[in-house]
Amino acid sequence: MGAGPNPDADDGTPGLQELFRHYDDLYFRGALADAGFSVERAAPRTKTITSFGYCSLGDLSKITLYKPMPRYRTNADLKNALLHLMIHGIVFVKRGLTSLGHGPAFRDWMDAINTSPIDDYARPKGGYCITTTHDFSQEKSCNMQGFLWKCESCGDTLMRAKNLGPPSDFCCIENVSQPATCDNMLCHWHK
């Protein structure tokens, strides 16, 4: 499975279905598909986003990644999030554990994939970094309320209480003078 498209290319997010099949075959020997698992993108049920998605166990057997988050994250983050949720699925399939905890069974799978020498064309350049957290940041939670906007200059994600479009009054995109005059501490373009 070493050859294949470059999923970290700048032409967009890798296909979720393709990644699911690839990872299921490579790391889980097709056990998730055999157990009826599927994968989808869906809007979160509320404006509060506390994780990158969830894994439904039992009759539903579905992995869901929330639509807003992968749009503002790297392809490596998307892959780590998908693998995290797939590990929850495989722990359910192999051990019958319906808890979505991160106990020894979860950590064994996580460590095995993070350190795997298997030839994997979808592996990010820095390798996988699957964690036991359900957000993308180890230093802060993704518990957000509001509307996300990605700065075109710095690539950082900014948040607004109302969906008013790009916050040009808050982002350095309008402050290109030397020295930069941006007062928004969320925007690090001027660093």
Image (cartoon, rainbow, N blue to C red):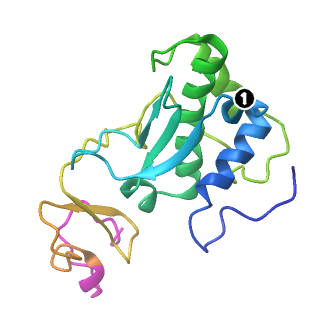
Residue span colored magenta: 173-191
Can I make out residue 130 in this image?
no
Work out which quarter of the rendered image holds the C terminus and state it.
bottom left
Q: Which residue is mark 1?
A: 31
In the rendering, at what x and y percent does residue 90 appear?
63, 25
* Relative to 186, residue 132 above or below: above
Could you tell me which secondary element the residue under label 1 belongs to? helix
Residue found 12% across the figure and 65% down from its top: 162
In the rendering, at what x and y percent does residue 61 appear?
53, 31
**Magenta segment: does it hold 128?**
no
**Magenta segment: does it hold 190?**
yes
Residue found 36% across the figure and 38% down from its top: 139
In the rendering, at what x and y percent does residue 129 appear?
59, 39
Q: Amino acid at mark 1?
A: Ala
From the viewer's side, name the closer residue of 126 and 110. Answer: 110
Residue found 72% across the figure and 26% down from its top: 112
Please tell me in which quadrant of the rendered image residue 3 appears: bottom right
Can I make out residue 69 in this image?
yes
Please tell me in which quadrant of the rendered image residue 34 appears: top right
Q: Is residue 191 left or right of residue 4?
A: left
Q: Is residue 87 left or right of residue 168?
A: right
Q: Is most of the magenta stretch helix, strand or loop?
A: loop
